[in-house]
Amino acid sequence: MNWFDWSLERQGYPIKQATKDLEGLALLDPVAFEARQQTARDAIVAHHLAHTPYYQKLVPSGAQTPWSQLPIMTKADLQTPLKQRLAQGFTPANIHQHKTSGILLIFVGNV
């Protein structure tokens, strides 16, 4: 296990399960993979619209917005303080932040 995976695992991120899930995705045929991708995408959007005040401001209340019509986040959106962009139940203390090449990566472990 490399240092990055080890550090994520120590912070509660289920890296072994994530690796197993990734291997399973690699076995899917293209049609099944796309269906799985769309299901996951829709679940992520629904979660953020239900639990993240920052994203609730971006989309009209109760709207069933098609993926193609969701607003694209800009650099200014990403420069909004992290605390304001986190979903309910998450804080800077229970996520993993990692900077590479000017990009801030955020991983959420078991909460």
Image (cartoon, helix red, strand yellow):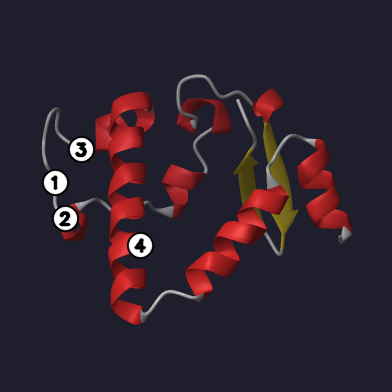
Where residue 61 sits: x, y (%)? 14, 28
Q: Residues within 10 Å of mark 4 (few under 14, many from 20)?
A: few
Real-space Cα distance between discs 1 and 3?
A: 8 Å
- Are circles 1 and 3 on residues that touch, CB within 8 Å? yes
Give the left or right position of residue 84, taking residue 38 as reference.
right
Q: Residues within 10 Å of mark 2 (few under 14, many from 20)?
A: few
The mark that comes first in sequence, 4 or 1, is 4
108 relative to 34, above or below: above
The mark that comes first in sequence, 2 or 3, is 3
Real-space Cα distance between discs 2 and 1?
A: 6 Å
Q: Residue at x 86, y 60 (%)?
A: 1
Give residue 37's mark: 4
Give residue 65's mark: 1
The mark that comes first in sequence, 1 or 3, is 3
Quarter where residue 97 is shown: top right
Helix, strand or loop status at disc 2: helix
Helix, strand or loop status at disc 4: helix
Q: Which residue is mark 2?
A: 69
